[in-house]
Image: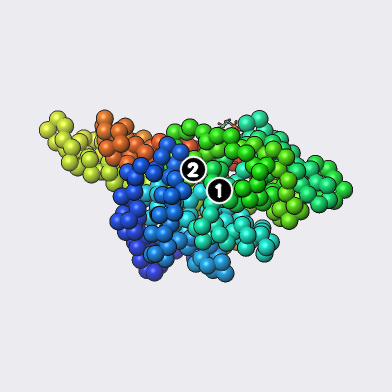
Amino acid sequence: MIDFAIPAELAAERDRVRRFVIDKIVPYERDPRLTAHGPTDELRQELVELARAEKLLTVQAPEALGGRGLTHIEQAVIYEAAGWSTLGPVAMNCAAPDEGNMFLLSKVADPDQVQRYLVPVIAGHQRSVFAMTEPDGAGSDPAQLATAATFDGANFTINGRKWLITGANGAKTWIIMARLAANPHLPEGPTLFLADGDEPGIVIERTMNTMDRNYVAGHGVVRFDNLVLPREALLGEAGQALRYAQLRLAPARLTHCMRWLGAAERAQSIAVEHARTRTAFGKPIGEHEGVSFMLADNEIALHQCRLTIWHACWLMDNGEKARHESSIAKSFVSEELFKVADRCVQVLGGIGISDETVVEMIFRDMRAFRLYDGPTEVHKYAIGRKVLRG
Ligand SMILES: Cc1cc2nc3c(=O)[nH]c(=O)nc-3n(C[C@H](O)[C@H](O)[C@H](O)COP(=O)(O)OP(=O)(O)OC[C@H]3O[C@@H](n4cnc5c(N)ncnc54)[C@H](O)[C@@H]3O)c2cc1C
């Protein structure tokens, strides 16, 4: 049965989240601790405590680990409300990369790893990173992975360089992708490792200056300099990193869509208000067809995006991997929402590019969404190949 109704309890929780974000979180958008390299850890911790007090922290986590074990559809509804402010998901501990990392660890980590690396992240006490992308190796094509790992039967040694690693500076739980060399003990190939951010072999060279600032601690350039890890650092099976990355990415792509949908709605609400009140040529600008059509295009896009997200969620809640549908959703939603944000800037006129409203920040932050978790072209490349296969 197809049912688009949101159950009353979920709708009430969505409204509670939206109120929490508007009343408690939005005021922090002008906090100086929201820096060019994202919210500082101090700001994050303050926001996390606000969500904890409202019992809104990490609600997506499995029930056995203290969360409410939200289904994908439930996440779609709650994350959209949280996304009203880019700080909402930070407060509620459902922002990237932690949210996707928690999902992956809850599926793949062994019980000791869960206690050491996952539980403190779920509790909001520490952050995590997923270190895959490299300047000269893995990117759109993770198979180009160049970071190298060796294994002597007792310890792994990892060497390589990564960049665009979100949250690197200050994160404790590290998920590292490296190519395990042939050895007599374990299968070779791309492999995931868990490490503590304090390991001396993890060197943060610098934090990159980027156009977005919604992710805690920004994006780092990182070097693994003879990083030595014990056998217990192996996450899942050796040689299976690309499979695990897919396991993480299909839902993680969708959660980006959910959060950005909330931000785009916020931008639209500001543009609508402006179109009602700002006048030009004798009437509110919203009464000029050129403006009302932009707002209508936004409304259409927001609706289409929500349905696309919900459909992929519904498939996953029914046990499907939904890789194809999540690819369709990621490419479609990222492109459409960016157009929504752009039209909102346009409706606002000159102030649209200023920080007089939050639309400028949403526009800037959202640009990167078309790149991470698979650039649009890479998703289209995969979708196109599937279409051609028939
Ligand atoms: C804000 C942000 C946060 C990020 N956080 C992380 C993180 O925490 N951890 C991490 O590991 N990585 C992270 N990344 C990296 C991200 O995953 C990569 O940027 C992405 O996978 C693309 O890789 P690349 O940047 O190396 O681009 P490239 O692989 O160099 O690709 C460049 C461009 O080539 C085009 N292209 C590539 N392949 C195809 C194709 N088959 N068909 C058509 N066109 C193609 C696309 O237009 C693409 O944008 C982040 C990136 C951003 C922007």
Q: Residue at point 67% right, 64% down?
A: 111
Which of the two residues, 200 or 155, is positioned nearer the viewer here?
Answer: 200
Q: Residue furthest right?
A: 184
Seen in the image, is 146 located left or right of residue 162? right
Q: Residue at point 80% right, 46% down?
A: 151
Measure how far apart labels 2 and 1 are at the Cα level.
9 Å
Bin the neighbour count of mark 1 within 10 Å (Cα to Cα): few under 14, some 14-19, many 20 and up: many
Which of the two residues, 171 or 262, is positioned nearer the viewer here?
Answer: 171
Q: Residue at point 83% right, 47% down?
A: 152
Q: Earlier in the sequence, mark 2 or mark 1?
A: 1
Q: Residue furthest front?
A: 200
Seen in the image, is 187 located left or right of residue 147? right
Q: Amino acid at mark 1?
A: Ala
> Dot 2 lies on which element?
loop
Checking the image for residue 171, the label placed there is 1
Q: Amino acid at mark 2?
A: Ala
Ligand 1 lies in quarter? top right
Q: Residue furthest left?
A: 282
Name the image quarter holding residue 288: top left
Q: Is residue 236 visible?
A: yes
Residue 172: x, y in percent? 58, 51
Name the image quarter holding residue 280: top left
User: What residue did someone put label 2 on?
Assistant: 217
Residue 242: x, y in percent? 68, 46
